[in-house]
Amino acid sequence: MTGFDPAFVQLGYVTADIDAAIDHFTRSAGVSQWLRWSDVAVEKEIDGAVARSVLDLAFAWRGSTMLELIRPVSGAVDIYSLRGAEDAPVTLHHIGHGVPGAEAEFEARLEAMAAAGHPIALVTRGEMGNYALLDTRATTGLYTEYLWGGPRGDALFDSVPRNEIFYQAIA
């Protein structure tokens, strides 16, 4: 992958149980191969201060869409609140858009969204890329994420398992 696709690229879900969420997507969408990370320590900037959270994560491609599962474990995890039915295996949290080009493109996108009235909820900048959640809940009901990978982030996304899409004709 040469930089993230500038179009819609990711659906990010929050879950209380990653195994149940994976089972849900295996049964409902045929997505059974995942890259899983447990106890991932993430440092991010929230309202100008550095905060730390621990998350369990799982990633899988289905066609050109990446699914991300997030299980908040500890620390600054309020942004990953579970909404919806208590017994739902997943709750849609954000829609991710890739930012191609240089890192300056990522910063320009954040500035433009903030100027348009969508506050930056959190930003993570690191060797695995830059990721930002903007608070677009007033207009979409969800957060919007911008992803800029850089070489190591692109390599990470390339390592995420790709699940084939099979279509069955309806008789």
Image: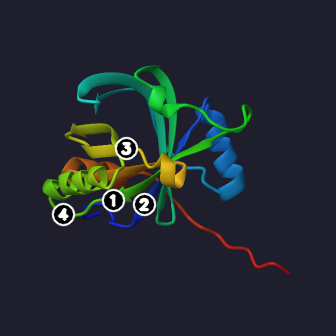
Q: Earlier in the sequence, mark 2 or mark 4?
A: 2
Q: Earlier in the sequence, mark 1 or mark 2?
A: 2
Q: Secondary structure beneath disc 1? A: strand
Amino acid type shown at disc 3? Leu
Please name the residue that numbered disc 3 is placed on. 133
Spot occupied by residue 145 in the image (x, y as percentages of width and height): 38, 49
Q: Earlier in the sequence, mark 3 or mark 2?
A: 2
Amino acid type shown at disc 1? Gly
Q: Which quadrant is home to the N terminus?
A: bottom left
Please name the residue that numbered disc 1 is placed on. 98
Mark 4 Cα within 10 Å, few/some/many (few <14, many 20+)?
some
Residue, x 25% and y 57% (percent of image)? 112
Which mark, residue 52?
none
Residue, x 49% and y 47% (percent of image)? 137
Spot occupied by residue 13 in the image (x, y as percentages of width and height): 54, 43
How far separated are the C-alphas under marks 1 and 4? 10 Å
Which mark, residue 101?
4
Spot occupied by residue 151 in the image (x, y as percentages of width and height): 19, 52
Horizontally, is 80 left or right of 145 in the view? Answer: right
